[in-house]
Amino acid sequence: MAVESALLTVGECYAADRLAAERGVPSLDLMEAAGRAVAEEIRRRFPPAPVAVLCGPGNNGGDGFVVARHLQAAGYPVKVALLGPLAALKGDAAAMAARWNGDVSPLGPEVLAGAGLIVDALFGAGLARPLSGTAAETVEATNASRIPIVAVDIPSGIAGDSGAVSGPAVQAALTVTFFRRKPGHLLFPGRALAGEVVTRDIGIPDAVLAALRPNLCANGPALWQSAYPWPRLDGHKYHRGHALVISGGAGTTGAARLAARAALRVGTGLVSVAGPRSALLVLAAQLTAVMTLSFEGADGLRALLRDKRRNAVLLGPGNGVGAATRANVLAALETARPVVLDADALTSFADCRDALFGAAKGELVLTPHEGEFARLFDAAGDKLSRARSAARQVGAVVLLKGPDTVIAAPDGRAAINDNAPPELATAGAGDVLGGFVLGLLAQGMPPFEAAAAATWLHGEAARAFGPGLIAEDLSETLPQVLRWLKERAGPGVTLDRT
């Protein structure tokens, strides 16, 4: 996995602290560095104003005492409020509270009076229960106050491993976390509550990350750029693959056309759309560089796939739900070609999922949205857990779409995508994404990397186009993103999207 963009679970973060201590970095030094980092980020953004620092009874509260001390030294008027008695603090938190040269008030909504900034150091990412009592009342008052809130590590009330919220949770303008982000910073609803997320180095040695060997990261070029299939100087179109998109009948060709153009734009050497004869006139009237083919039934599709140059297939968009689509899918899977399944190709197996699971003889990528996923899988839990479980169950890469798309491989690797703008919620955008995945598979990119790259390119194209986006704009904007990517992504170079 890409170490630059690795995400750590709460358990891995605890292990990182322990491993750092074993390598000679005291936990008290880590706490001091964490609190100082938060204070520095505040000073970069907020001029001196009265600050209310809300401290919890654990190490997150200890960080809060450090923040308070550094802000006070910088000229900020600071008020500290603590949940529970001061004498109950233990370990590093107690040591940092002893270094605070000021009063400590009991936590409650009244401590917000007169504040121009609030620091949330109540609970960290490991909180496993809903906020209640005084903490819940104070968080609700904090959100209602409209005063800017800076969260330490993660906004209180958000589960660090899942982004889940089971009760009141802080709505932060800024979250400062340490060493590496957590899944809850990227998964909804946590992502919507975290505001701007800044990750600061607090002195944990790089060797700690290597020891942890995380298998989760934020999606981005660092994950897949070394496998990206840039054109070769001595190449020709068949070196770049021949992708096949399966279309529905005359009235439902739009999705296949969107996917086919996307596959062509992402670099595939040749793309064909194949459908029933009734669709050929519509397809031919709308397509130019994309070729058209006809076939009837699963045996007809098998005949098309005897041409080994047609080396990757997308089925589902606009294909219709039922036995015919199911038969076409199984015919494609038995060829050992890379296959992408979306939309109707997934729903067609809702009542006979066992026929799909394990049927692929080659590489397989599934690209469901939440509704399609629920029809096919019984996986429970948060989005990341469900995607991973489904990938293991079906033996394929699962790309579970949404504003926080998760890409999961059967071997446990996973990536969370965080560059999708709201404009992507438009008809046909998912068909374009399927086409991007198909095109990269046709060019020989491994399935996990192809799915991750396609998802990131999809989001970047939408961001580059901006307001007014419709699905057709994604493929037309992609060259601009690819140009940017190629100019900045030589071998071994990590991109910075900022």
Image: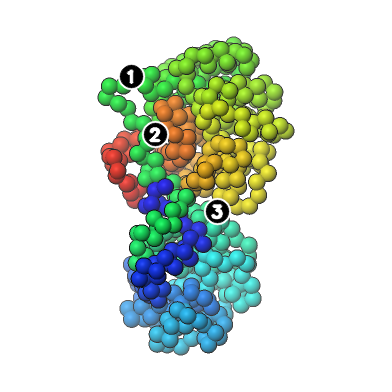
Q: CA distance from mark 1 to mark 3?
A: 43 Å
Please, what is the three-letter code of the amino acid marked with disc 2?
Answer: Leu
Left or right, 180 with respect to 487, comes to: right
Viewer-side residue, 37 vs 389: 389
- Mark 2: secondary structure: helix
Left or right, 101 with respect to 402, comes to: left
Query: Comparing marks 1 and 3, which lies closer to the viewer?
Result: 1
Q: Which mark is residue 198?
A: none
Q: Which residue is mark 1?
A: 236
| For residue 452, above or below residue 283 | below
Q: Residue at 48% of width from left, 60% of height from top?
A: 12
Q: CA distance from mark 3 to mark 2?
A: 26 Å
Please, what is the three-letter code of the amino acid marked with disc 3?
Answer: Phe
Q: Which mark is residue 478?
A: 2
Q: Are marks 1 and 3 in contact (CB under 8 Å)?
A: no
Query: Comparing marks 1 and 2, which lies closer to the viewer?
Result: 1
Label located before the other in sequence (1 or 2): 1
Q: Which residue is mark 3?
A: 188
Viewer-side residue, 348 vs 262: 348
Please, what is the three-letter code of the amino acid marked with disc 1?
Answer: His
Q: Position of residue 67 (x, y in %)?
A: 40, 75
